[in-house]
Image (spheres, rainbow, N blue to C red):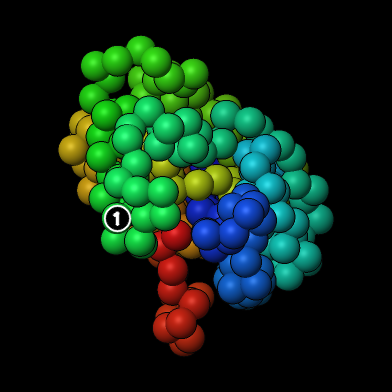
Amino acid sequence: MGQLLLVRHGQASFGSDDYDVLSGLGERQAELLGRSLAARGTTPAALLHGQMVRQRRTAQILAEASGWDASPECDVDWDEMDHLEVLSRHPAPSDDPSPREFQAWFEAATERWIAGETDDYTESFEAFTRRVVAALERAADRAADRDADRDGDVVVVTSGGPVSWVVTHLLSAGTDTYRRLAPVVVNTGVTKVVTGRRGLTLVSFNDHAHLEAEPALLTYR
């Protein structure tokens, strides 16, 4: 039986000129997770990440902090949805929205995208879910493909949207579940999926015990 550990990236630089760069807090979150996973004896056969800078950098820090031999590998299908395009399809509340206004704008824009009533997106919500499931299945194949020297664990660094859809998919749930999960995925939270004779099974969601000793490290954006 192999297992997948799906990790949301560390905190990005929200509100800066380049959101895709990890904040100092995000780097610290990733370092603590790497140490925590090493202390638990996690030694992955593969370390995957999407192509976004925040995902790749989180994977690099995990490898450094844990001392893993596995080199980070990119699988673009673990990318987050294009939130900038999704926002651009819905009117902004103002030229400089407050954090509360931005959150309301983001939720309304995302709801428009999820509803699928228009086709003006480069990637529809349906296409997003298909590629995430395809990435999940490829990672599961890696986890199930043991060799004589290594276990079948695979660590994947991705984002809140893909993590939320994986959980929704494995629970055979619908978009209402996705809507509830997506806002609460913690930066560097870990979701565990095992692969065995029953296929893929969700074991835990959003574990962030490595952050609990320092409450200021707990972030959702």
Above or below: residue 31 compared with residue 198? below
Number of numbered discs on residues: 1
Label 1 CA crowd tier, 10 Å (few <14, some 14–19, many 20+):
some
Question: Which x, y percent locates residue 175?
Answer: 23, 33
| Quarter residue 110 falls in | top left
Residue at left offset 29%, top offset 15%: 118
- Helix or strand or loop: what does disc 1 sit on? helix
Residue that label 1 marks: 101
**Measured along the vertical axis of the image, is residue 159 above or below residue 186?**
above
Query: Hey, which residue is sitting farthest left in the picture?
Result: 176
Q: Position of residue 95 (x, y in %)?
A: 41, 48
Q: Closest to the observer: 153 or 118?
A: 118
Q: Residue at x 55, y 45 (%)?
A: 158
Where residue 98 sits, quadrant-wise, is bottom left
Q: In this view, does 141 lie above or below 192?
A: above
Could you say which is closer to the camera, residue 129 or residue 145?
129
Q: Residue furthest bottom?
A: 213
Task: Relative to 197, say whether 62 is above or below.
Answer: below
Q: Nearer the viewer, residue 124 or 70?
A: 124
Q: Would you say 16 lies left or right of 126 here?
A: right
Q: Residue furthest front?
A: 95
In this rendering, position of residue 144 left or right of residue 184: right
Work out whether residue 218 can be spotted. yes
Type of the residue with mark 1 = Glu
Could you tell me residue 106's position as x and y percent? 34, 45
